[in-house]
Image (cartoon, helix red, strand yellow):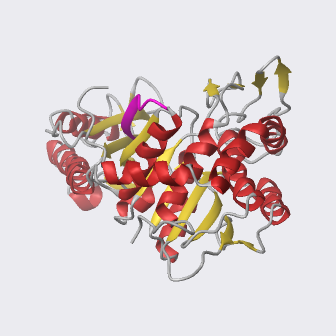
Amino acid sequence: MKNIPALDPKVLGLVTEISKEPKVEAAIAFIKDQTEVAMLEQIELCEIEAPTFHEEKRAASVAERMRQYGLTDVHIDEIGNVIGIRKGSGNGPVLAIGAHMDSVFPAGTDVKVKKEGNIYRAPGIGDNCSGLRALLQVLRALEKEDIRTVGDIWFVGTVGEEGNGDIRGSKHLCANNKLDGFVAIDSTDVGRVLYGAVGSHRWRLAVDGTGGHSFADFGKTPSAIHAVCRAGNIIADIKVPEDPKTTFTIGTIKGGTTVNTISAHCEVDVDIRSVSNDELLRVESEVLGAFEKAIKEENARWGVADENGLKLTKTMIGNRPGGLRPHSCPVLQAARSAQKTLGIELTNYAMSSTDANAPMSHNIPATCLCSGGKGIGAHTLKEHFIMEKTELGPQLVLLTALALAGTETTKPLLG
């Protein structure tokens, strides 16, 4: 990659030092030795249905596994997140490591895993059962080698990361707890580190009126479809910056009944994205303003008073906050140093939309790391996972977490 920001040599030195601690070396080796066991756990979790908004059965399994692996403080919060707390030595930071439990697939989907050599096929096997596998591997390794940390580490299975779940689990976690750092585990490419969270606001905008016959009522009643077309014309010319990258689109449109009808109803779904919450809100305001203006213009075109003409209904259907972390952020520096220590090349220093959006929007040091292995065809029925170098994901998260939370011989990077 070109133009990679500088890596702090002090952080790299710290992570290298931690990696050479005997217990940490043993934990890294244990993760690799437990590859087959971990893969079995990934399969077992995949075969428990967990559609967004219905993660209860998988959550119960994740909670039971956390207890089985040594955590005594495990609970499921009000929204459905599984939280297992591994206490530090005291007066240290709180680091949350989270992997989302939900799947995009509806109840009744065949999630039985089919094995072909080192390839495992099933909807959800990679996204995000591989993340849950890595999360639990880190916990097992810490417990196996009795590695104590200065700060508390929260192991979290989150709900509602996908689609209309709108990262509700992560948002709830960050809004109701004091966290000093957050590492999400999602996707499989260990060469990726996220420094930015792409925020998105999604709206369903419905225009309604009386409608009428295309000939008999022409000139008497405004058209819902025409109003939406007017709004689209305005929206198409909205100016957005290249940096911070900001985008918008009318993604769907539907309405009308027949070719010879003045439409009584039309609705669109609009997606607005940015890594800057300020830009997100600015463009959102322009989009909503375009619809309000368009309705007034369509009503006025036919001489209909606004109170008797078309009406606008605005429904927010998605709200993911955005954010950016400075390249000096301790979580980013720790993650990149852990990559270098493990011989992993940074190939994708990027921005995306994950559970890390919520903490970044709260200015909490955060990133999203990956589980290892190779996931292909996420969000499709042909999804499959290739079991190769799967140990690298949990090893990366382990080293990053120890640098952030501090060990018996090192101070935590998190304040």
Q: Is residue 131 visible?
A: yes
Q: Identify which residue is drawn at 70% across, 38% down.
A: 105
Q: Is residue 154 left or right of residue 364?
A: right
**Is 359 on the left-hand or right-hand side of 196?**
right
Q: Nearer the viewer, residue 13 or 60?
A: 13
The span shown in magenta is 344-352
Residue 318 visible at all: no
Does residue 249 lie above or below 156 as drawn? above
Figure quadrant of residue 366: bottom left
Instruction: Where is residue 324? Give x, y as percent.
Output: 30, 52
Image point (78%, 53%), residue name: 58
What residue do we see at 24% from left, 39% from top?
A: 245
How far from the left and from the top, in percent, is residue 111? Answer: 81, 34
Nearest to the observer: residue 107 or residue 234: 107
| Residue that lies at the very extreme toward the top in this rendered image | 117
Answer above or below: position of 155 versus 378.
below
Q: Is residue 287 magenta?
A: no
Is residue 246 left or right of 126 when viewed as pictured? left
Image quarter of the C terminus: bottom left
- Furthest residue in direction bottom, as rendered: 91
| In front of the other: 257 or 369 | 369
Return the x and y of residue 172 as percentages of the image width and height: 53, 68
Residue for point 58% across, 61% down = 169
Q: Is residue 76 above or below residue 211?
A: below
Specify the quadrant of the image occupied by residue 262.
Answer: top left
Quadrant that contains the N terminus: top left
Can you give x and y, in whole percent of width and height, for residue 363 in the image?
Answer: 34, 64
